[in-house]
Image (cartoon, rainbow, N blue to C red):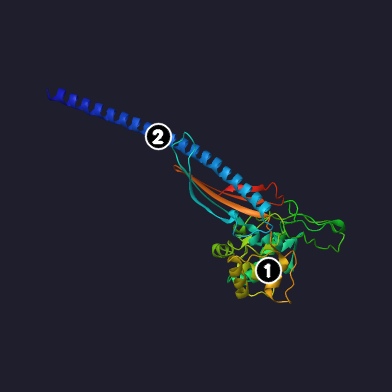
Amino acid sequence: MNGRHRQRGMAVISALLIVTAVALLITGLFQRQAASVRAVENEQARIQARWLLQGGLDWARLVLRDDARRNSTTRLDTLWATPVEDTRIQRPGDDRIAVFSGRIEDEQGKFNLRNLASAGIPQPVEVAAFQRLCAILGLPGSHAPQVALRVASAQSSPGRGGESGTDGAGSLAGAGGSTGSASCGSDSAGQGPTAPMIRGVDDLRGLTDVDDAVIDKLRPFVTVLPGITAVNANTASAEVLAAVVPGLSLSQARALTERRNAGAYFNDRADFGNRLANPDIQLTDTQIVTVSKWFSVNGTVTLERAAVTMQALISRENATTPSVVWKRETN
């Protein structure tokens, strides 16, 4: 009898173990299936969020086109400069609610690192301006020639007959700027780029003494655009104005921007020069403009568990049809 009880007991234990194993297998299958379903749902939400961001990008182009039609200058008191915060979006027949936030920034309100070199040759005037900006931000001036050489390395040097090369990004002409072609005194063939062009301030990592702290200080004040550009006096910070205008102190630049932001925007470069009240300061169209043609768009859409952030650069060189130069997701 004891043997039979032991056998029955072992059978019961074996059955329980089998049931437990089966239950674990089924639970695992359900968990994997649920995870797969969530992954598909998340990807669908991300795709829909991308489409919503594309809609936001199209809206930004329309706003910038309308601004060019209505205003002869680019200022901070118009619609394009108003951020969109936590706007709820719901499509017909869909109970889900997406949340959109975005803003447009004038990239010509910043110092363009592309200006530091032309045709593979650092430009002393621009390097000096960047040195002043570094000093204002409490950074070593030695960063300026380093960055200039980095930008120059991504450009072609002049070829035979003094022909200027480009950096592979198309025309170097920008709003209010010029190509600044360097002269070529030799008859040698030009040299091609030895490095890719930087796309933004983050690409400066790797240069001597350029760490995250330096990049964080530079980020609000510098940009990298496809062409050489002047600074828009109506949107630039006091730090950038003091850097690009020799003889203009930071305190004077702050006084100018305070009056400007109170509504006294500049009509043109001559108006800006007159308000400097300093005849010794001579301005050119390669330094200061009051109309911008380059804008960045930053937007984020959150839909269910998906959050997608996109950056884009818009060119308004053709004011009637602003175009997207590039766009990329940042998360």
Q: Position of residue 150 (x, y in %)?
A: 68, 61
Residues 222 and 141: in front is 222
Front-most of residues 40 and 67: 67
- How many residues crowd around disc 1 within 10 Å: few (fewer than 14), some, or many (20 or more)? many
Residue 55 in the figure: left or right of residue 182: left
The answer to whether residue 49 is above or below residue 259 is above
Relative to residue 72, is residue 25 depicted above or below?
above
Give residue 3's quadrant in the image: top left
* Cα gap from disc 1 to disc 2, whole angstroms: 58 Å
- Residue at 38% x, 31% y is 29
> Which one is in front, 149 or 325?
325
Q: Position of residue 265 (x, y in %)?
A: 64, 65
Q: Is residue 331 visible?
A: no
Left or right: 251 in relation to 95: right
Q: Earlier in the sequence, mark 1 or mark 2?
A: 2
Badge 2: residue crowd in 10 Å (few <14, some 14–19, many ≥20): few
* Residue 126 drawn at (x, y percent): 71, 67
Total tally of numbered discs in the picture: 2
Whether 255 is drawn above or below 190: the answer is: below
- The type of residue carrying mark 2 is Ala
Q: Quadrant of residue 14?
A: top left
Q: What is the x, y in percent for residue 153? A: 72, 59
Task: Tell me the tag on residue 34.
Answer: 2
| Image quadrant containing the N terminus | top left
Q: Residue at x 65, y 50 (%)?
A: 66
Is any atom of residue 23 visible in this view?
yes
The outermost residue toward the left is 1
Q: Nearer the viewer, mark 1 or mark 2?
A: 1
Which disc, if any, is residue 244? 1
Q: Relative to 106, is 9 on the left or the right?
A: left
Q: Secondary structure at mark 2?
A: helix
Quadrant in which residue 273 is drawn: bottom right
